């Protein structure tokens, strides 16, 4: 018994060692030559990552610094953490001399950290306070990517779906459709039953199956940028939404529960027949959860995906602080619950110019490199449209260290 | 021949110093005093820090922050904060957990110490101690995915159907079972091993002469346990209860996962709720406005003071019990 255990343990240990060995850059000392397409295939069933480095202008001068000699620390929003981590991983092959760390500690934590100067860059879904711009903090927010917040639901059907005749395909229900007012009414506990006429009217295919059970709304119990995007959308959808839009709000009293993180919301929804909750699109995709389509301001039924978030982002009106709200877009193709996530940098008083250059090169690579951009879509987020991307890169080019622009 | 060093004359100043430190008694005492003062200083500095960094919230909300209300608001958007739902949630779940856990753990302790056959004792002891070492997040996961839907939801529905008239058991129960009752039950499972293990040790520490004397006087085994052993070990058992209560009050992760995290108007045990530890864990990282984080720190301060007060109350009880039992009977 013990021996068997030991063998299993040993196999696991060896496997994990192999994994980590493959996961790190194969030869950390030697910089990757720019023309070579580096292909690292981790040989397991679980993880398969192929890094294709496309040569870009920046890389024509391979760095002569030793591998891992610059460590860049970032922290903040959990919303884009999956993408940032993936970018940081891939970037090791572009510029082995820099190690990028990103900790998803939450937008509020990220903003605090960059104001206090404990991190080199921060990620945030929520905006900096005006005071942070004015009191000599030299901070600036840059949009990095966009994402959608989707509604997941768990409806116990009123009666079972009919069994298909031999040879015919099984009957399935389409994704639930909600309009903006109905959604607000649900989260206001004004609509409390799944077979409410307002819901039935929007979902004719569901008519016989919507049960007379209570709706339980599930929200994030922790403060979150996801909540901010969602509640800002609700506030924009209808004047009935009184709780406002913020990272934590006072949820209307009623049949609601809170779950911690995307995972907590998803677990509550899965465990609670009659529940509806909101998570990031990438979370719903990676966990194969069914999510609802929404009818937008123009009256079109929109499935949340890259295209519909792109449409919402295309209409963004950026303020002079380079921030924009894109919930409830007027564009007929736009998904109405979408938002940007931002990078926060010091613009004039970064002390270490080498590090400053590495940080900006990383972000320039992330926004311009086709492989980096395709990773965004794969993870269920949306890269910035060309115009917004240009705005961001223009902003980055203004960042200076010791009075000289960092990016040449 | 090795030359022995001459002892210094008594009058030499160095010899006085050497004498002073010769046996290390003084040094030891100084170190121990320092360490004990460190504990006190730590307590005070924690309290002072919490008090200090919640000053704005305290001046703005005053007593209304703490007072019971049926329409409490916790509104980060409009900066209105009242902590009553969390105070109530913490007190209710901890006390119910303690009520449920006490008889069970006392039973376990008595069985293990007095009645258990030898071959069963070791594995049972081991399991009880193992249960105490399970991380709380594991209890949380188990509670969320197994315990809530399988036990709490049906139990809550039945309780609401039978006792629904009493405000404490008013329904409706959410279909997932997330409720204060769920949190109390998970908490009681978490504190049972703590109370049981310590109470067992207390009972085992009672000298055999007590049992023999009681049996010799003609008591049954049950009378011996109930009228001799339990009173004899009462102060130790109360100590175990304090530790259990402390764990229940401060438990964060498992409770957050099962209580539903909802600010409820009703006082019902069967509705979702919120605790002080949960709200801090949930919102502190993302508390954007100054007042929001100060309000959370004030909640932390209230929790700190409440834990202190409950501990002092329990200490007082132990002292009362101990002063009533004869000197040689103390454990």
Image: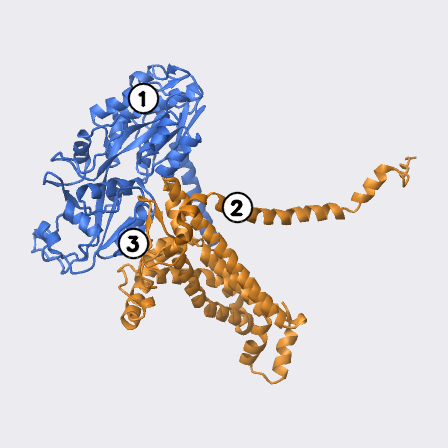
Chain colours: A blue, B orange
Q: Which residue is mark 1?
A: A396
Tell me, yes or no, whether dots 3 and 1 are on the same chain: yes
Dot 3, how many residues are within 10 Å of its Cα: few (below 14), some (14-19), or many (20+)?
many
Distance between the alpha carbons at the discs numbered 2 and 3: 34 Å
**Disc number for residue B48:** 2
- State left or right for residue A116 relative to residue B36: left
Mark 3 and 1 residues: CB-CB less than 8 Å, in contact? no
Nearer the viewer's eye, disc 2 or disc 3?
2
| Res. A179 in view | no
Q: Which label's residue is closer to the chain start, 3 or 1?
A: 3
Of residues A128 and A21, which is closer to you in this image? A128
Nearer the viewer's eye, disc 2 or disc 1?
2
Farthest residue to the right: give it. B1
Mark 2 and 3 residues: CB-CB less than 8 Å, in contact? no
Of residues A245 and B143, which is closer to you in this image? A245
Chain ID at mark 2: B
**Residue positioned 24% across, 24% down in the render:** A389
Residue B117: % across, % down:
53, 72
Distance between the alpha carbons at the discs numbered 2 and 1: 44 Å
Secondary structure, mark 3, is strand
Tell me, yes or no, whether dots 2 and 1 are on the same chain: no
| Res. A384 in view | yes
**Residue positioned 60% across, 72% down in the render:** B232
- State left or right for residue B264 relative to residue A200: right
Chain ID at mark 1: A
On the rendered image, what quadrant is the C terminus of chain A found in?
top left
Secondary structure, mark 1, is helix
Q: Which residue is mark 3?
A: A257
Dot 1, how many residues are within 10 Å of its Cα: few (below 14), some (14-19), or many (20+)?
many
Residue B292: % across, % down:
38, 44
Q: Is residue B27 above or below residue A2?
A: above
Residue B262: % across, % down:
32, 54
């Amino acid at each position: 018994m013990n021996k068997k255990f030991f063998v299993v343990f040993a196999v696991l240990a060896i496997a994990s060692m192999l994994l980590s060995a493959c996961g790190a850059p194969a030869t950390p000392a030697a910089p990757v030559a720019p023309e070579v397409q580096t292909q690292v295939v981790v040989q397991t069933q679980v993880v398969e990552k192929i890094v294709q480095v496309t040569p870009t202008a920046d890389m024509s001068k391979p760095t002569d610094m030793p591998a891992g000699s610059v460590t860049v620390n970032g922290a903040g929003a959990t919303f884009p953490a999956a993408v940032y981590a993936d970018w940081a991983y891939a970037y090791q092959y572009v510029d082995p001399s820099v190690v990028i760390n990103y900790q998803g500690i939450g937008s509020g934590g990220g903003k605090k950290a960059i104001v206090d100067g404990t991190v080199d860059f921060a990620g945030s879904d929520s905006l900096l306070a005006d005071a942070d711009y004015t009191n000599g903090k030299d901070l600036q927010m840059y949009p990095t990517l966009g994402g959608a917040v989707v509604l997941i639901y768990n409806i116990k059907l009123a009666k079972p779906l009919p069994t298909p005749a031999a040879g015919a395909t099984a009957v399935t229900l389409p994704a639930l459709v909600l309009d903006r007012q109905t959604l607000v009414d649900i989260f206001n506990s004004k609509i409390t039953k799944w077979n409410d006429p307002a819901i039935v009217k929007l979902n004719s295919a569901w008519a016989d199956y919507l049960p007379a059970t209570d709706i339980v709304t599930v929200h994030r119990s922790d403060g979150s940028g996801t909540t901010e995007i969602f509640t800002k959308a609700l506030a924009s959808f209808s004047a009935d939404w009184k709780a406002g839009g913020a990272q934590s709000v006072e949820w209307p009293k009623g049949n609601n529960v809170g779950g911690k993180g995307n995972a907590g919301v998803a677990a509550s929804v899965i465990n609670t027949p009659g529940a509806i909750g909101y998570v990031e699109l990438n979370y719903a995709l990676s966990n194969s959860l069914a999510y609802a389509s929404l009818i937008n301001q123009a009256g079109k039924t929109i499935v949340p995906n890259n295209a519909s978030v792109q449409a919402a982002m295309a209409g963004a009106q950026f303020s002079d602080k380079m921030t924009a709200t894109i919930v409830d877009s007027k564009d007929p193709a736009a998904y109405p619950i979408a938002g940007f996530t931002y990078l926060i940098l010091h613009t004039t008083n970064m002390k270490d110019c080498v590090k400053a250059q590495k940080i900006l090169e990383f972000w320039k690579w992330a926004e311009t490199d086709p492989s980096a951009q395709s990773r965004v879509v794969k993870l269920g987020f949306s890269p910035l449209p060309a115009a917004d991307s240009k705005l961001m890169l223009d902003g980055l080019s203004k960042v200076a260290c010791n009075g000289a622009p960092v990016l040449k | 021949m090795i030359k022995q060093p001459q002892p210094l004359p008594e009058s030499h100043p160095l010899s006085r110093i050497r004498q002073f430190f010769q046996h290390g008694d003084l040094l030891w005492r100084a170190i121990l005093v320092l360490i004990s003062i460190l504990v006190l200083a730590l307590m005070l500095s924690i309290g002072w820090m919490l008090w200090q960094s919640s000053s704005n919230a305290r001046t703005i909300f005053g007593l209304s922050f703490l007072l019971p209300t049926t329409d409490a608001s916790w509104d980060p958007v409009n900066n209105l904060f009242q902590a009553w739902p969390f105070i109530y949630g913490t007190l209710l779940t901890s006390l119910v957990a303690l009520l449920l856990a006490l008889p069970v753990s006392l039973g376990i302790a008595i069985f293990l110490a007095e009645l258990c056959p030898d071959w069963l004792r070791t594995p049972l002891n081991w399991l009880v101690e193992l249960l105490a070492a399970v991380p709380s997040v594991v209890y949380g996961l188990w509670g969320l995915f197994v315990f809530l839907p399988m036990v709490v939801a049906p139990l809550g529905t039945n309780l609401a159907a039978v006792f629904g008239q009493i405000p404490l058991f008013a329904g409706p129960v959410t279909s997932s079972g997330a409720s204060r009752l769920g949190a109390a039950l998970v908490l009681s499972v978490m504190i049972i091993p703590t109370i049981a293990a310590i109470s067992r040790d207390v009972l085992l520490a009672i000298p055999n002469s007590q049992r023999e004397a009681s049996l010799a006087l003609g008591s049954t085994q049950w009378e011996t346990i109930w009228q001799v052993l339990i009173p004899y070990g009462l102060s130790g058992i109360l100590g175990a209860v304090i530790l259990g209560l402390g764990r229940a009050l401060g438990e964060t992760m498992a409770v957050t996962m099962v209580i539903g995290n909802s600010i409820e108007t009703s006082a019902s045990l069967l509705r979702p709720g919120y605790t002080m530890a949960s709200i801090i864990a949930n919102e502190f990282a993302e508390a954007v406005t100054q007042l929001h984080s100060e309000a959370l720190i004030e909640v932390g301060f209230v929790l700190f003071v409440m834990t202190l007060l409950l501990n002092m109350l329990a200490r007082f009880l132990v002292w009362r019990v101990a002063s009533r039992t004869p000197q040689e009977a103390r454990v």
